[in-house]
Image (cartoon, rainbow, N blue to C red):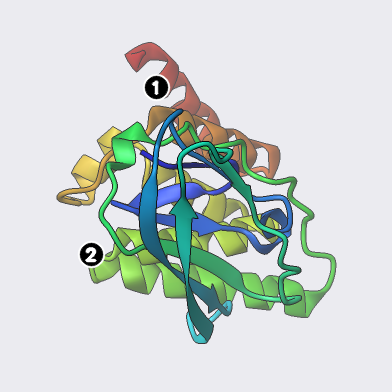
């Protein structure tokens, strides 16, 4: 029943959180919640390599605040994934926040790196690993790659998930709309049409 102030759910009890959000990350719990939960924290590089992995325990006692704020200053590169030791219901989590502002790549090597991330995301998607694909697509989209924003939106779009024959992946029309909107801002062809389709289906 936990909820994070940033990031989005990638599985039961698992969240992907961008590095810029870690400093002010908050964990919200229901009033009166108590107990202990083991938390694994992984720092993931752009190529999918796990750079650092550590564990901690979140303890909530009666009478203590139900919001814990992360104070660690994150490393300068990569992406972070939080994974709770005990399974949690992803449907009970707070709605994800809007994607962070995109800064389009200004140098050739920035675009090349974004294309590599996009390719890695497609590889994970072909393997059926939608959660991992989302991490790569998000990094590439944050770098300003329109096709990555489209691909990320598609992993939340029920119609596209059906087309991909992705089983066991829960669609999220709000996330799909946010990333299609970002793709449209970046000039992706087809984003406008998919936004209209999402609007018509609601």
* Residue at 46% from the left image edge and 39% from the top image edge: 62
Mark 2–mark 1 Cα distance, whole angstroms, equals 25 Å
The residue sitting at the front extreme is: 63
Where residue 144 appears, as percent x and y from the top left, is: 70, 56
Q: Quadrant of the N terminus?
A: top left
The reply to whether callout 2 and callout 1 are in contact (CB within 8 Å) is no
Where residue 179 appears, as percent x and y from the top left, is: 54, 40
- Among numbered discs 2 and 1, the one appearing first in the sequence: 2
Q: Quadrant of residue 67?
A: top right
* Residue at 50% from the left image edge and 80% from the top image edge: 54
Q: Quadrant of the C terminus?
A: top left
Q: In this view, does 168 lie to the left or right of 148?
A: left
* Residue at 25% from the left image edge and 54% from the top image edge: 87
Where residue 6 appears, as percent x and y from the top left, is: 59, 45
Q: Is residue 161 above or below residue 44?
A: above
Where residue 90 appears, as percent x and y from the top left, is: 32, 42
Q: Is residue 79 above or below residue 33?
A: below
Q: Which of 199 and 38 is in front in this view?
A: 38
The numbered mark at residue 91 is none
Q: Nearer the viewer, residue 36 or 19?
A: 36
Q: How many numbered badges does the structure rendering display?
A: 2
Q: Quadrant of residue 114?
A: bottom right
Q: Is residue 101 above or below residue 19?
A: above
The numbered mark at residue 197 is 1
Q: Which residue is labeled 2 in the image? A: 128
Q: Which of 14 and 145 is in front in this view?
A: 14
* Residue at 78% from the left image edge and 64% from the top image edge: 105
């Amino acid at each position: 029943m936990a909820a994070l102030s940033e990031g989005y759910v990638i599985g039961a009890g698992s969240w992907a959180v961008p590095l810029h959000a870690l400093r002010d990350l908050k964990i919200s719990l229901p009033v009166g919640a108590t107990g202990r939960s083991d938390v694994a924290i992984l720092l993931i590089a752009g190529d999918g390599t796990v750079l650092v992995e550590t564990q901690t325990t979140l303890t909530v006692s009666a009478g203590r605040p139900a919001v814990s704020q992360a104070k660690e200053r994150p490393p300068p590169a990569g992406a972070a994934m939080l994974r709770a030791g005990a399974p949690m219901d992803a449907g009970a989590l707070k709605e994800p926040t809007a994607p962070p502002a995109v800064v389009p790549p200004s140098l050739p090597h920035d675009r090349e790196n974004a294309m590599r991330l996009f390719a890695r995301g497609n590889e994970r998607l072909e393997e059926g690993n939608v959660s991992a694909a989302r991490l790569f697509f998000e990094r590439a989209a944050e770098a300003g790659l329109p096709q990555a924003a489209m691909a990320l939106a598609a992993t939340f779009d029920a119609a596209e998930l059906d087309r991909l024959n992705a089983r066991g992946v829960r669609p999220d029309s709000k996330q799909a709309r946010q990333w299609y909107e970002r793709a449209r801002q970046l000039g992706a062809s087809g984003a406008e049409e998919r936004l209209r389709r999402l609007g018509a289906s609601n």
